[in-house]
Image: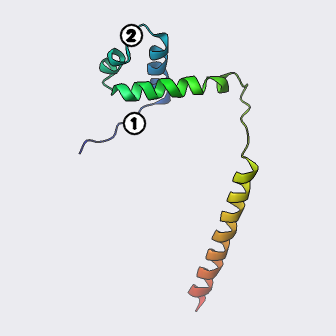
Amino acid sequence: MAKRRNFTDQFKAKVALEALRGDKTVQEIAARHQLHPNQVSTWKRQAIEGMADVFSGGKQAGPTEAEVRELHAKIGRLAVENDFLSEGLKK
C-alpha cells in the first residue's frame, strides 16, 4: 500500500494559485506536480472559499453558541467518567 503524502500549506497555495490563473488546465497542473486532478480542483475550490478570510484582517468568528453548549456537555460527561473511574481505582 502506498504511503500518504503530506503537502505543505505553501505548496497547496502555489498549486491552487496556478489553477486559479487559468493559464493551464487542471490536468496539466496535476501532471506537472504529480498530483491527481481531483486534488488540484479541491485545493482550488478551498482557495476560492477561503478568499474572504484573507481580507478579514485576522478576525475569525468564534465558536457558535451551540458548539459551546456541546463542548460544555462533553466536559461534564468526561468529568463524571473521570470521577467514576477514579473511585473504582481506590477500591
Tell me if 38 is positioned left or right of 3 in this view. Answer: right
Label count reads 2
SS at mark 2 in the image: loop
Residue drawn at x 45%, y 16% as measured from the top left: 19
Position in image of residue 41 (x %, y %) = 43, 25
How dense is the environment of label 2, judged by Cα within 10 Å: few (below 14), some, or many (20 and up)?
Answer: few
SS at mark 1 in the image: loop
Position in image of residue 74 (x %, y %) = 65, 64
- Quick one: 34 or 49, which is closer to the camera? 49
Badge nearest the viewer, 2 or 1: 2
| Snapshot quadrant of residue 86 | bottom right
Which color mode does the image show?
A: rainbow
How dense is the environment of label 1, judged by Cα within 10 Å: few (below 14), some, or many (20 and up)?
Answer: few
Tell me if 88 is positioned left or right of 34 in this view. Answer: right
In the picture as drawn, the residue positioned furthest to the left comes out as 1
Q: Which residue is mark 1?
A: 6
Tell me if 15 is positioned left or right of 53 in this view. Answer: left
Q: Which residue is mark 2?
A: 24
Residue drawn at x 69%, y 52% as measured from the top left: 67
Task: Using the image, determine if residue 4 lies above or below residue 72.
Answer: above
Position in image of residue 14 (x %, y %) = 47, 19
Task: Using the image, determine if residue 14 lies above or below residue 9.
Answer: above
| Snapshot quadrant of residue 8 | top left
Disc 2 marks which amino acid?
Answer: Lys
Residue drawn at x 47%, y 27% as measured from the top left: 43
Residue drawn at x 63%, y 69% as measured from the top left: 78
